[in-house]
Image (spheres, rainbow, N blue to C red):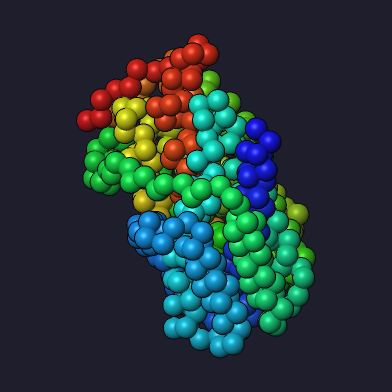
Amino acid sequence: MQRTALTLSSLIISIILLISGNAFLMTLLGLRLSIEGFSTALIGWILVFYSLGFVAGTLWAGRIIEKVGHIRAFAVFAAVLAASILIYPMAVETGLWGVLRALGGFVMAGLMIVMESWFSSKATNQNRATLFAVYQLVFFLSTAGGQVLIRVGDPAGFIPFSLAAILITLALVPLSLTKRESPTIVRGERMSLRTLYKACPQGMLGALVAGLLISAFYAMGPVFADRIGLDLGQISNFMASAIIAAMLLAWPVGRLCDRFDRYRILLVAACLAAAASAAAALAGGYSIILLVVCVGLYMGITATIYPISVAVTNDLVETRQITATSTALLLSYGIGSCIGPPLSALFMELLGPRGLFVSNALILIGFIAFMRFGSKQEHPSVSEQELFYMSYPEAALGLSEIDPRNTGFEEEAQSKSWPKTERRASP
């Protein structure tokens, strides 16, 4: 047990360094492009290349890991990411930054696969729920912590980029020193998006919408904050508070999803997020405190759309399909993340900074209309629903094996007399 705890502590340190460094970089890049006077539309197109690279990495980075092993692959991915970070301030050019963003997204996906597969290798039926929760908590705290680092230096200078590269490089140390044998990457069952849509159209579109909204905020949120005149400290608080709000709302939403109809909760969440987004669009010109509150509510509620969509979908598929379903939902989220930044940037170009939240509100209204009028699919009653687990796509790339909803956990649930649903066959 002590050896397991020691190994996990080294993994957690690597995760903290990597995630905080990458989150810091994402906010830093948006600010630097805004300072350099790039149009919001162009900023959106440059930053979306990260999502394109990340989606490609989820599909192909695993093959590199299989060929050279986890430690070597992690060293290569981290070295490439750190080097790319140092190149950014050397030449602020559209084409170069687009390539660097795509490269960064690809290697970041590879780094996440390595660390999460190592984390998953520690999971047993007795501890998987705890490990799942610990990983999600560490991920969100690290992401929020990365926003605080914006205060350390002028985004127009070289020092912040050097700090981000240092954090990524240091993430190599704990994982490289571990003596544990590398885990094996298991290729899971695949599910097409067409099959996923037939099984649960609301779940698939919910994941897509979540990708649109969250990627738009991470990419264009710093630009929005800079364009309305916030200073570095205020921008740091603005971004960090939104991420913390998403973490804090996880528990109450989870309780609601276990007690009430999840489909209705998803619909209500979309309505509340749309209202909060519209309020944020109006609050920017009045009070920074009111703005932070509205954006915190918006991001806190928006962050629940993906996990609720996962739960709604898993209630409709067979147990053996959960891993394949999760992979397909992540792909749907990834597609949305490739659309979000340029779409929100276009609205910001047309309407000014508030266009970020106007576009998000319109997307949510469209999703609400689909849920209300576009699909009449039946959903299980509350008593038939599976146990709910809050999961976030950014922290779920390689965690299908540790997900408590998989087959191993259901055996544990039976032994503890937890409620268990008979899975319906997928359409």
Residue 370: image location, x then y, percent: 34, 41
Q: Say left or right for 13 vs 423.
A: right
Q: Residue at x 36, y 51 (%)?
A: 331
**Quarter of the image with the C terminus in it:** top left
Q: Say left or right for 246 vs 192.
A: right
Q: Quadrant of residue 129?
A: top right
Residue 14: image location, x then y, percent: 63, 55
Residue 46: image location, x then y, percent: 47, 75
Name the outermost residue toward the top: 417
Residue 351 versus residue 424 in the image, above or below: below
Q: Nearer the viewer, residue 403 or 213?
A: 403
Q: Residue at x 70, y 82 (%)?
A: 157
Residue 53 versus residue 84 in the image, above or below: above
Q: Residue at x 45, y 71 (%)?
A: 103
Q: Nearer the viewer, residue 66 or 20?
A: 66
Residue 95 versus residue 194 in the image, above or below: below
Residue 108: image location, x then y, percent: 50, 62
